[in-house]
Amino acid sequence: MLDRRALSPGMIRSLEVFVAVAETGQMRSGGRLLGLSQSAASQHIASLETAFGTQLIDRSVRPARLTHAGMRLHNRAQKILHALSDMESELRRVGQASISLLRVGIQASIATTLTPALVALAQDRFGVEDMTLHAGQSGNHEHLLRTKQADLAITSNPFLDMDGLERHHILKEDYLLVLPGNYDGPADSLEAIQDHLPLVRFGDTTNAGRQIAQHLRRLRFEPDKVIQADRSSMVTSCVSAGQGFTLLTPTLLIDGMVENMNLRLMELPVTGLSRTLTAVARQGELQDLPKAVAELSKQTLRDHIALHVGEIGSESLDQA
């Protein structure tokens, strides 16, 4: 029989790890979502199996899968974690003028740019006492919001298929053509450029990568050679080294321009390719903070784009 004393903060953390591992299908990926190593995630799973006296994950097959007991626990653990999050949110709103805890997911490409201003806003204006920030892709943010491990996300996906969310527009930005700084070949079409340079773009595992690939297919442009990466810094470093060309938005370019990478920016010779950034939070849980975060993010990003990316970056933004 389970020792009730085991229902501690450590047990709750282990349940969070178990849900993350179950939903990603991998010990490494589940741990990464929560900022843990594979071995640390494995220890949490082992502690649950010891506490409940049963095997939760069948490790004899690849990929590992949940046992029958693991599937039952996954269902129960989700309900427990959701209930705890709901209780926390409700109590946080009752009789308090401030928000004691804030967990935020931020698009990796703008995390460095936004973090100092967001921390100052949360602490100074809303009295946030504890704050946790997660940098990642929009897929990570969706998981964090669905499992209530994040209260708010600044993301390129507004998650329109999820109910109970409030959404605050930050900005819409067009993609730009990004060439090596010393490139002197033709730049009037993607077909002409690819005769000299391969395409470097975000990988298909990212929202930006899928968006770019789908748009290029609609344009009937099929690059002969493609280099894929899942971070904007990796893409821009390849281009700066003369190893290819790419398509990036101004916010995806900020870090590379701050590091003085040797890049040449031009208007994209094709139309219709843009992305939107949105602040997304569960409806009514954070007072006016989501709206304030969207407004702060919009101004901070516009300022950094004007400073580091220049006029061509500012002109590619919506004027809302």
Image: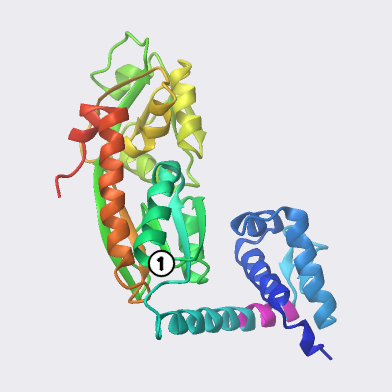
Residue 6, quarter of picture? bottom right
Q: Position of residue 255 (x, y in %)?
A: 42, 33
Q: Quadrant of the N terminus?
A: bottom right
Residue 269 visible in the displayed image: no
Q: Residue 60, relative to residue 282: is it above or below?
A: above
Q: Which residue is at the far bottom? A: 1
Q: Which residue is at the far left? A: 319
Residue 190, quarter of picture? top left
246 inside magenta stretch:
no
Q: Position of residue 267 (x, y in %)?
A: 22, 27
Out of 292 and 253, give the one closest to the viewer: 292
* 184 sits to left or right of 69: left
Q: Position of residue 140 (x, y in %)?
A: 50, 57
Q: Residue 190, relative to residue 38: is it above or below?
A: above
72 inside magenta stretch:
yes
Q: Position of residue 216 (x, y in %)?
A: 33, 37
Q: Secondary structure at mark 1?
A: loop
State the count of labels. Answer: 1
Residue displayed at 23% across by 31% down:
270
Residue displayed at 40% across by 85% down:
95
Q: Look at the image and give the residue range highlighted in magenta.
A: 69-75
Out of 201 and 1, give the one closest to the viewer: 1
Out of 304 and 233, give the one closest to the viewer: 304
Neighbour tally class for label 1: few under 14, some 14-19, many 20 plus, Cα within 10 Å: some
* 86 sits to left or right of 3: left
Residue displayed at 61% across by 61% down:
24
The residue that label 1 is drawn on is 127
Q: Amino acid at mark 1?
A: Gly
Residue displayed at 42% across by 21% down:
261
Residue 296 visible in the displayed image: yes
